[in-house]
């Protein structure tokens, strides 16, 4: 569609109206009120970037395994972007970074039924051909490659990559997916500064079974949820 407030919100309206099938994808090149993690907004220059949402029905995983949806979505983007340039990583839980700059974000919203995920909206926003980010710590494929790229081609490749990882999840490839995510995790095994209640020095060593970030602080390993920690860059 040419314009909408939020592809995730539009996807949710289709689910509420029972007017969708698994794999339905809503794409806009002009999203006016995109949503991000922690209630943030996602700003995107019209006609320059990719903002889209995929509806899936991952009833085959339990609520306790829902972080794997973050994993496969992040890997889907990395698989495509890494063919174009090195230095792409996923910043926990699901921002896409090139070197130390953000190039994309992911927002996953689930509808639960008993102990299963009935439907899931996977929202993805990626900086593709935008050149100026007005002082934000962000970049785009255009800035990295020195040329514009075809939006439709990148979209098609990411959707194909998402299908690949989604089927791997469906087939029970949890360990392989977990390890690939860790191999691509931003700041993993590096001594860095973080902020929780206070600033502290620590080293990311992985994620736990619930998707919390595991950090080694001195001789102690602590786990942090999405809103409990900040990266101090």
Image: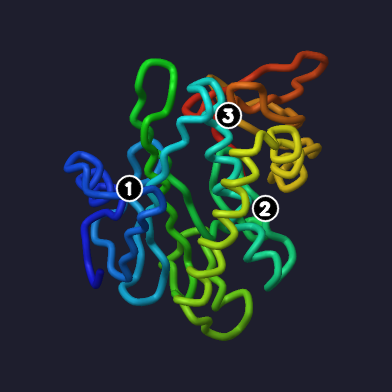
Which mark lies nearer to you, 2 or 3? 2
Using residue 187 as the reference point, say whether residue 1 is left or right of it: left
Q: Position of residue 33 (x, y in %)?
A: 25, 55
The one nearer the camera, 124 or 140, is 124
Looking at the image, residue 108 lies above or below residue 5:
above
Image quadrant for the N terminus? bottom left
Using residue 150 as the reference point, say whether residue 109 is left or right of it: left
Residue indicated by mark 3: 195
Query: Residue furthest toward the left?
Result: 17
The one nearer the camera, 220 or 123, is 123
The local crowd at label 2, few if under 14, some if 14 to 19, many if 20 or more residues have their Cα within 10 Å, is many
Q: Position of residue 196 (x, y in %)?
A: 55, 24
Residue indicated by mark 2: 89
Mark 3 or mark 1, which has the lower sequence index? Answer: 1
Q: Position of residue 149 (x, y in %)?
A: 53, 81
Residue positioned 24% across, 61% down in the render = 32
The one nearer the camera, 124 or 173, is 173
Determine which of the numbered discs, if any, sits on residue 35 in the image.
Answer: 1
Q: Are marks 2 and 3 in contact (CB under 8 Å)?
A: no
Residue positioned 57% across, 76% down in the render = 143
Q: Are marks 1 and 2 in contact (CB under 8 Å)?
A: no
Q: Position of residue 98 (x, y in %)?
A: 64, 60
Looking at the image, residue 20 lies above or below residue 219:
below
Count of numbered badges drawn on the protein? 3
- Measured in 3D between alpha carbons, the distance from the residue under mark 2 to the one under mark 3, in whole angstroms, is 21 Å
Which mark lies nearer to you, 3 or 1? 1
Mark 1 or mark 2, which has the lower sequence index? Answer: 1
């Amino acid at each position: 569609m040419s314009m909408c407030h939020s592809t995730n919100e539009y996807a949710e309206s289709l689910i509420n109206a029972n007017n969708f099938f698994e794999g339905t994808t809503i794409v806009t090149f002009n999203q006016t009120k995109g949503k991000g993690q922690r209630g943030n907004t996602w700003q995107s220059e019209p006609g320059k970037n990719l903002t889209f949402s995929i509806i899936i029905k991952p009833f085959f995983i339990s609520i306790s395994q829902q972080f794997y949806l973050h994993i496969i979505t992040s890997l889907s983007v990395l698989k495509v972007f890494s063919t174009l340039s090195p230095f792409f990583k996923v910043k926990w839980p699901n921002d896409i970074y090139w070197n130390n700059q953000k190039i994309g974000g992911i927002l996953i919203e689930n509808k639960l039924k008993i102990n299963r995920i009935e439907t899931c909206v996977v929202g993805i926003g990626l900086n593709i051909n935008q050149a100026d980010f007005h002082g934000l710590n962000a970049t785009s494929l255009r800035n990295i490659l020195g040329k514009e790229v075809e939006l439709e081609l990148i979209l098609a490749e990411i959707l194909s990559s998402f299908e690949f990882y989604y089927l791997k999840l469906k087939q029970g490839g949890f360990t392989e997916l977990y390890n690939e995510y860790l191999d691509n995790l931003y700041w993993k095994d590096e001594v860095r500064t973080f902020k929780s209640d206070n600033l502290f020095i620590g080293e990311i060593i992985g994620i736990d079974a619930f998707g919390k970030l595991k950090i080694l602080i001195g001789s102690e390993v602590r786990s942090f949820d999405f809103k409990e920690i900040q990266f101090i860059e």
